[in-house]
Amino acid sequence: MTISENELGQAIPVGVDDGYAQTKVCSPDPASLRPDVPGMPLVIPSRGRTGPASMGGAEGDVPASVYCCGHELVTVDAGLIDPEETRGEQYKTSALNRAVVFHALYRAGLDEPAARGRGLCLVTGLPYSRYFTAVGTRDNAQIEAKTLHYQQPVARLNGSPIARIVWHTVSPEAVAALAAHNVETRNPGGRWSAVIDIGGQTTDIVLVTRNTDGVTIDHAHSATAPTAMLSVHDYMRQKIPGLSRRACEDALRQFTHTQRALVHIERQDQDVSELVADSLAAVGAVIGRQADRLLATASADIDLILVAGGGAEALGRFLRIRGVEIVNDPQTANARGFFYKARERIREGRMRGRA
Ligand SMILES: Nc1ncnc2c1ncn2[C@@H]1O[C@H](COP(=O)(O)OP(=O)(O)OP(=O)(O)O)[C@@H](O)[C@H]1O
Ligand SMILES: [Mg+2]
């Protein structure tokens, strides 16, 4: 996709963090007089199903949440009783992912005529271990696959137009949370900062240094671990077979906010607070040990250890790492970081367009 710097200067900055569990969109606040101030981010579960099921309204009408992605039909719906599994490497470039992302853009109002007229300057992400190769160089194959992914055909089955992307780049996920923290606290940060981004499927642990060359990632102390909030679900489901993911998630949110969790199992309320506490402690200890192993030799010099991602509030205190800080609104921190990056690119476009 090639557009002029002038066109890019007019585009709308948008950050999309298309996680395995939730898709987060950060775009400008429509109520603000300044068009580049981020609004309240939108969060939708990354849930849908490929195939013709659940595509009709009660009167036979086609809802806006049904997408044609090439030959595949995808229904995006948070309420589906049996959503498709998003765990696995292939989700990020699947038809389901494309439909979920365009649906999130629709829910954020970014397919309306004014927004389509300007087009979107989009920044999305990849987990640390997919953005970088094992030796710490950019994994161009993965990055290109993700860039091409949003250029594949996608349309709404009811014929209404979808959001128009005019520029897109891919950025590493956890680093974006640190960027959001630095922009929002107006603090450029110390020399060494670590980020632990606890998502649904994976936890990214990244050590970033700031020196005269700008920001660099210390790859010897960074990794993606396959343990995160869905591991807490697994732990709970081992103890109560048949407990749905929806019930696990509900229990975890209740417990995080009130230290108690009641779930409805087989038509009866059951107090699962102890099980939730044990599961969080077990998974928190695994992630904490992983972070400790990675960061141990650098730990005395690290000025800030930031915890981000939807699992931050639930698991932060179970990591048993001293002095960690939970970033503001952790589940949307990456999307906000991507938004700031898109906004920066648009400002560059305006400057170059004027020159
Ligand atoms: N306040 C909260 N309390 C408890 N759980 C929460 C809270 N906020 C979010 N979660 C849960 O945290 C999990 C991880 O959320 P997040 O959006 O970071 O995952 P993701 O980005 O989709 O996953 P990944 O980074 O692995 O792709 C989700 O299961 C979400 O429901
Ligand atoms: Mg994530």
Image (spheres, helix red, strand yellow):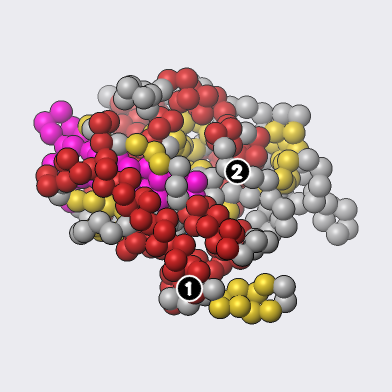
Q: Report the front residue among 284 and 141.
A: 284
Instruction: State how far apart marks 1 and 2 are (Cα).
Output: 28 Å
Q: Is residue 286 above or below residue 51?
A: below
Which of the 4 image quadrants contains residue 218? top left
- Stretch of the chain drawn in magenta: 187-215
> Where residue 317 sits: x, y (%)?
32, 63
What residue is shown at x 44% (from left), y 47% (from top)? 227
- Asked if the magenta segment contains residue 288, the reply would be no
Looking at the rendered structure, the kind of residue marked 2 is: Thr
Identify the residue under disc 1. 274
Asked whether residue 96 appears in the rendered view, the answer is yes
- Quadrant the C terminus occupies: top left
> Where residue 146 sits: x, y (%)?
51, 29
What residue is shown at x 45% (from left), y 25% (from top)? 143
Answer left or right for 179 relative to 19. left
Disc count in the image? 2
Looking at the rendered structure, the kind of residue marked 1 is: Glu
Identify the residue under disc 2. 86
Badge 2 local density, few (<14 within 10 Å), some, or many (20+)? many
Q: Report the front residue among 318 and 323.
A: 318
Q: Report the front residue among 66 and 309.
A: 309
> Where residue 107 sits: x, y (%)?
59, 53
Q: Report the front residue among 253 and 112.
A: 253
Answer left or right for 105 relative to 132. right
- Asked if the magenta segment contains residue 199, the reply would be yes
